[in-house]
Amino acid sequence: MNVETIFEEEKDRLREGFCKYMRKAYRILPKLNKLRILDIGCGSGVPTLELARLSQGEVIGIDIHQPSLDRLTRRIEQAGLSNRVKAMNRSMFNLDFADESFDIIWSEGSIFVIGFERGLREWRRLLKPQGFLVIHDMTWFRLSPPQEIYDYWKSYYPGIKTVPENLEQFSSFGYELIGHFALPEDTWWIKYYSPLERCIKELRAQYIDDPEALLILDKEQHEIDISRKYHKWYGSAYFIVQKR
């Protein structure tokens, strides 16, 4: 198994620790039956499978990274969920589903790819009347961040905003806010980046003679170093809205 695959599996294991926040967001929704859910930017499917367990409905996970979709497909089969969970290679820039196809659209750390405003505008047509959109997105926790972290996020996610700035946008795009909450300030550092750093140290020892593997680990380490210095300035929040 190559270092990239090992690392992605470790990330998935750590992401499972965030499912309690997914469950908190899901409980804000009213109880609904026979749901059809679209998970946009599903990756290898940690959120997709959690949505299937929570809803007992039909879930479609879409992404464009086929290796991740292949891992999700294997997990779907292992969980015995092939009858109601599907992994599809689809771009969020070209969602060819019919209008009003879904009761819930879920975006777990993926709306940044298309942009917050564009996602709100384009995904609305896919929701059934009074359907729900749930977004988990990175946000600023404090104003006037230091230049280094400001430049880092503006290069990675130019549209990153504070929670209040995001809240201001929903009404103009035809949504009603149902609820929102930010993850505790140190969550990403404690539950994700710090254990990921321990994994990197172990992998460096195993792949010390593999330059390509070490380059991958160096890139991942940079993101961890940024989090160590500035994790109090940014984090993530859930937004739960209903189509008007």
Image (cartoon, rainbow, N blue to C red):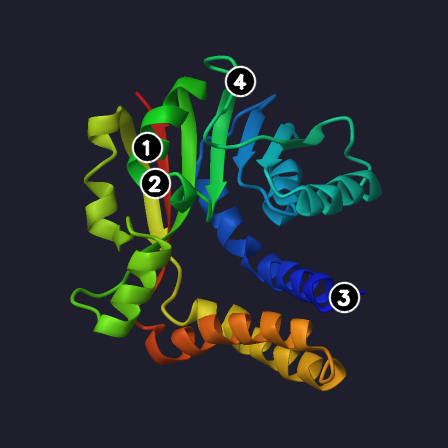
Q: Are marks 2 and 4 in contact (CB under 8 Å)?
A: no
Which residue extends farthest front? 211
**Label whose residue precedes the other's in the sequence (1 or 4):** 4
Secondary structure of the residue carrying tag 3 is: loop
> Disc 4 designates what residue?
97
39 versus 19 height, above or below: above
Q: Do we see residue 191 in this rendering?
A: no
Amino acid type at mark 4:
Phe
User: Horizontally, is 80 left or right of 222 in the view?
Assistant: right
Toward the viewer: 31 or 82? 82
| Within-10-Å neighbours for mark 1: few <14, some 14–19, many 20+ | some
> Disc 1 designates what residue?
118
Position in image of residue 68 (x %, y %): 67, 47
Residue at coordinates 17% horizontally, 64% vertically from top-left?
Answer: 143
For marks 3 and 1, give the one nearer the viewer: 3
Which residue extends farthest left? 144
Toward the viewer: 163 or 177? 163
Residue at coordinates 64% horizontally, 45% vertically from top-left?
Answer: 45
Amino acid type at mark 1:
Arg
> Disc 2 designates what residue?
115
Position in image of residue 154 (x %, y %): 29, 58
| Within-10-Å neighbours for mark 4: few <14, some 14–19, many 20+ | few
99 versus 153 height, above or below: above
For marks 3 and 4, give the one nearer the viewer: 3
Q: Quadrant of residue 84?
A: top right
Position in image of residue 157 (x %, y %): 34, 53
Toward the viewer: 134 or 152? 152
